[in-house]
Image (spheres, rainbow, N blue to C red):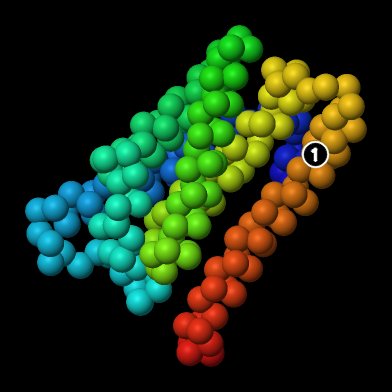
Amino acid sequence: MLEKLKKLTLNQILPYLLVITGTIGLFSASILMIEKVALLKDPGHVLNCDINPIIACGAVINTPQASAFGFPNPILGIIGFSVVLVIGMAILAGAKFQRWFWLGLQAGVIFGIIFVTWLQFQTIYRIGALCPYCMVVWSVMIPLFWYTTLYNLRNNYLKVPLKLLALKEYLLQHHGDILVLWFLIIIGVILHHFWYFWQTLL
């Protein structure tokens, strides 16, 4: 099984990645929306993801950042991840898409990664709490953006100047290392910023 997975190309992996990240992201966004509605109905409702003073959805979900565009952020997640899931299923069913379609998806994941990165900064440095379901969304948005971008680069849907072709090849060859480093940086930032709390648990 592992040998078969290793032989899969980026083009073969992407639809499965879209389905997996779309499903996980949709589930997490839906849970957050359910919790938000429960809070609107009952301000005293205790969220199931309020674990301690730092890992707590309640400390995040009622902040202005949680409704950055005037409505709850999970609505964006439900819509966006539903689209991703449908695209992945369509590709697995044999659908083929034109370059303009892939550029549209690229625009979507660029918006998603910028928004998620902004939310990470706001959550860690401004709000001072971590929402578990939000972190799940972060965790799927990063590979979704990364591998959609690499797919578009490999298939020349994203054009790059000749002087950047070496960089393109480097990214394609070291995609896994870069992804791991990305996650390690985020984990490092979280550990460092909240170390005052983590050390009380040791």
Q: Is residue 96 above or below residue 170?
A: above
Label 1: which secondary element: helix
Q: Is residue 51 left or right of residue 196?
A: left
Residue occupying image coordinates x 51% and y 84%: 196
Q: Is residue 92 left or right of residue 126?
A: right
Residue occupying image coordinates x 64% and y 57%: 183
Q: Quadrant of residue 35?
A: bottom left
Give x and y (percent) for residue 29: 36, 45
Q: Nearer the viewer, residue 9 or 81?
A: 81
Give x and y (percent) for residue 200: 48, 89
Q: Is residue 7 above or below residue 45?
A: above
Give x and y (percent) for residue 182: 67, 54
Q: Is residue 43 left or right of residue 72?
A: left
Q: Is residue 36 above or below residue 103?
A: below
Q: Is residue 113 above or below residue 85?
A: below
Q: Is residue 173 left or right of residue 19?
A: right
**Residue with the mark numbered 1:** 171
Q: Residues within 10 Å of mark 1 (few under 14, many from 20)?
A: some
Q: Nearer the viewer, residue 76 or 98?
A: 76
Residue occupying image coordinates x 43% and y 35%: 81
Q: Nearer the viewer, residue 26 or 103?
A: 103
**Amino acid, disc 1:** Leu
Q: Quadrant of the N terminus?
A: top right
